[in-house]
Amino acid sequence: MRIRRKAQFELAKRGEKGYQIFEATINQKNNQLARIHAIVGISQLARMDKMDYAASLVALLQDSDPEIRAQAAKWIGDIKYKEAGNALMPLLSDSEIRVRFFASEALGRISYEPAIEGLINVLKENNDEDAFLRHAASLALARINKKEPLIALASNPSPAVRLGAVLALRRMADPGITAFLSDSDEYIVTEVARAINDDFSIEPALPALGDLLMTTSFQNEPLIRRAIGANLRVGTEKSLENLKTYIAKPGINPVLKAEAIATIGTWAKPSVLDRVDGRNRGAVERDLAPIQASVGNSLIKLLSDRSDLIRIEAVRSIGKLKISEAEPNLITILKNDPVDPVRVEAILALAKVTPDNISGPIEMAMNDKSKAVRVVGLDLLTKTDISEDLMENLLKDVIQNRTIEERQAALLSLGNLPNSANLEIWNSLLEDLKANKLPNEVMIELEEAISETGSEELKSKYDQIQQERTGGDLVALYSGALEGGSVRAGRRIFFQNQTAQCIRCHGYDDMGGTAGPHLNGVANRLSRTQILEALIEPSKRLAPGYGFVQLTLKDGTAVNGTLMEETEEGLVIKEASKPERLIPNAEISERKNSPSSMPDMKAILSKREIRDLVSFVSTMTKEWE
């Protein structure tokens, strides 16, 4: 093939002399490949020199070989030889689908208007059986760019013809596509919705797509989501009424109803990204007051809906739109709703709707039976304006009585309070630390919280107690990293942290490097303490096969090599290219470990990140296969 193509290009460079050989070649019938190369070569000459050369291709449109007809049509279209339009027309009804495909494509490339009816007939005869042929015909119609005959196809009895027209009008971005929104075929209507909403959209057609929400009997998700989104983008009072009417309908899909409610919630300030396809639509801001007045009652009614999903979106939208009339309803939900996520959204909404009266709801949330609700209440505690006494009492209760996650969050919140260093609670916390009453899981948060206060006195007391507790032992000082970390965050550090770059040196499954030990099954071999030690004192313990050791034997012999294994009997050492050998412990008088090539993570990661990494590595129990 390469040789044939080289010959074709060389002949094309020779101009008229090459053309004569090409012409002679297409007139012979013994070698199909040679004829195809000649067709392509002539199209090269026509493109480079003069279009008159292309005239010799027109006769091939009637050739007895269907592949020659197809190739002739293909390259006539490629060079856009307009004079071939009439000769291409009969090929639209050719017996070979490949010929019809390239003829359709060519007629579109030369924008041959008389071919419109023939291309419509291609769509009809194909009857959607071949997607490639449908594409060629609809693309050709779009390139011819005559909208009237396409819009008129809205009443054509053939669904294949109507779909082809929709696809063509989409390419043309013509608002006349709305004529197909009343089609009886659900798939076609959905394709119209995609055409109007997606990509760069057909903006003049958006109001019609939004109004479809009120009239269509179809309820598939791609269609309804686009109709909902169209109303948001249009943004008129009528569009908002469309959504209000839709969410009041009985028996509609709860997922789509929730989407409509969520859309109402963003009405004042929609995301710049399209809710369906994520394309940037630009910033929009609308006056909040009329929106509140219009949708307040509708959203409040939904707070008693039986669907958890509907209640969640209604509460969330009320919070976003700051509908203050809903405060009593939200408090009732916070007290009584049986579903935890609904109560979570209720406290979040109350913080937005009535920030001046949030103390009571926060206290209620922090005493909730659900940890999820309590954590949200705790998070809001330092972000809202409530009295210092109430804040301190609530935080103290959490630190003393709640789960580890809540204690961690409460300590961090405590450190961020204004004038936090003056609170009495620090004395009791430091006494608990001194008496070893605090769990390891909160040690890091305690240290961070004390640092956040900015108090040198508290920092000095903390450091002194830690020195007395640990005797300066590094692993003991980092004992807070042994428990309480996030496996998910640790995984992210292991695979993605650009500073630590764990995966660059260590392999896991079929990923990673080979500079360090493969970590499959490491949690079966090392305790959490040993994993921590490897991170903060990497030279203290050598991984077999990766550490260099220097030995002095009792007879004065020096042995320097890679530590391959450490057993109860002694050390297995490999010196350069020599075979491995076991050196009994009884023969060793001195041992020195060379510094590990692994970086000290204390200088790279925070204590909290080290804790997360320990938590993740401790899950690596799967052995290498």
Image (tube, rainbow, N blue to C red):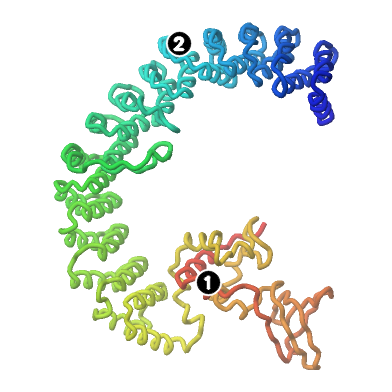
> In this image, 275 relative to 490: left or right?
left
Q: In this view, does 65 lie above or below 313?
A: above
Amino acid on which disc 2 is placed:
Pro
Q: Which residue is drawn at 67% across and 56% down?
A: 625
Mark 1, residues whose alpha carbon is within 10 Å: few (<14), some, or many (≥20)?
few
> In this image, 574 relative to 346: left or right?
right
Q: Nearer the viewer, residue 330 or 29?
A: 29
The residue singled out by tag 2 in the image is 149
Residue 398 lies, in percent from the top left, at: 28, 69
Instruction: Locate the N terminus by quadrant.
Output: top right
> In this image, 73 relative to 308: left or right?
right
Looking at the image, can residue 406 be seen? yes
Amino acid on which disc 1 is placed:
Ile
Residue 236 lies, in percent from the top left, at: 25, 32
Q: Nearer the viewer, residue 282 or 562?
A: 282
Q: Residue 545 carries which label?
A: none
Residue 334 lies, in percent from the top left, at: 21, 53
Mark 1 residue element: loop
Residue 388 lies, in percent from the top left, at: 19, 71
The residue singled out by tag 1 in the image is 604
Q: In which quarter of the image is residue 218?
A: top left
Mark 2 residue element: helix
